[in-house]
Amino acid sequence: MIAVKGGTIITVTNGIIQDGVILVEGSTIREVGRDIDIPPSSTVIDAAGCYVAPGFIEAHCHVGIGEEVFRIEGNDINETTDPVTPYLQALDGVNLNDLAFDDAVRSGVTRLMVHPGSANVLGGQSVLLKSWAPNPMEMIYRHPWGLKAALGENPKRVYGDQNKMPKTRMANAALLREALHTARRNSEKEQLEPKDEFRQNALIRVIRREMPLWLHVHRADDILTALRIKDEFNIDMVLQHGTEAHLVADEIARRGVAVCLGPLLVNRAKVEMQEVSFRNVLILQKAGIEFCLITDHPVVPIQYLGICAALAVREGLDEEAAIRALTWNPAHILGVDQELGSIEPGKKADLVIYDGHPLEVKSRVRQVLVDGIIWGG
């Protein structure tokens, strides 16, 4: 048993508990409150004068698949030989010893959604990882976890430069529709050829709504194309990046589609990101769109996820909403909110102890628990 006592507990779902106690049994939070008896054999972590928050969840990054130090030999984000590769698995390209995992846990990020890149219209299957575990294989939390797709400038630039399809946004959409159409037809068959079964499995699961499509879109026109495709195939979809989501917020809200918003701590060098602004968060919030904040590491280093939320607060987002955008919201968007995203009994014990408020730039991480295990850093 582990007891975290004396801190200001940001539960996310049940307010703030001053001078609280959290009891952790195994990987799970057993009790949360003020007047809780601590079993005498417990390992006690004194959090007096500190804040205790759920571990942050990075819902869109490329940690481990686009490594910190290595260049060509450590860059496994995009397989640019074919624009339709739904059978690839991001996990097979992840180096679990990438330095960025350590940066993540040191900054309070305990779970990371690692996606293939956006060079392909269909890039492959994503994986949800812990940022740390005693054994690297134990870092795998959910695999595979959704299918990555992309519209917009990236696929048409990569393959247009090779004089291949897609060279236009029309072709991006056509390739995605064709793949989904084929999968819908194949989903009705009793048996497929082994090669087709392997290559079609993830798409068929998307068609059957067994996994979502994580769709890379920046511009408003690409977002509208994505929403049309969602309507046509009745699939679960989460928009990734959504730089111009604020321009079509009503359409997004009408369909109940969530947005993994970011990267925001960037310049406007990418043509599709002329509208990037932390103020856009307020428009999504007002429209009732569920959103979380992302770094898209290595575009923004993973350790600055909390800084992104702090800058959103500077632009008018309230602190409670900012914390939710790093905890409960990404957990819900990723479909793991029954286990992660808040501090309450029955949830996974992903806990971070700070010497100040989690969104205060001067605050430092003092201790981290991932899945109930005290981080050894």
Image: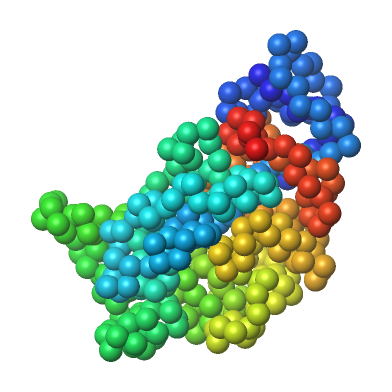
Q: Position of residue 152 (x, y in %)?
A: 44, 81
Quadrant where the C terminus is found in the figure: top right
* 222 displayed left or right of 375: left
Q: Position of residue 42 (x, y in %)?
A: 71, 16
Quadrant of the rendered structure where residue 27 is? top right
Residue 13 seen by the camera: no
Toward the left, the furthest residue is 193
Rendered residue at 78%/43% (across/down): 354
* 171 displayed left or right of 344: left
Q: Position of residue 47 (x, y in %)?
A: 82, 32
Rendered residue at 52%/60% (across/down): 69
Toward the top, the furthest residue is 40
Quadrant of the rendered structure where residue 291 is? bottom right
Up-down relation of residue 215 to residue 202 (above or below): below
Looking at the image, which is closer to me, 8 or 298? Answer: 298
- Colouring scheme applied when the structure was drawn: rainbow
* 123 displayed left or right of 136: left
Quadrant where the N terminus is found in the figure: top right
Q: Position of residue 173 (x, y in %)?
A: 35, 80
Looking at the image, which is closer to me, 251 or 120? Answer: 120
Rendered residue at 42%/64% (across/down): 75
Rendered residue at 63%/45% (across/down): 105
Residue 135 seen by the camera: yes
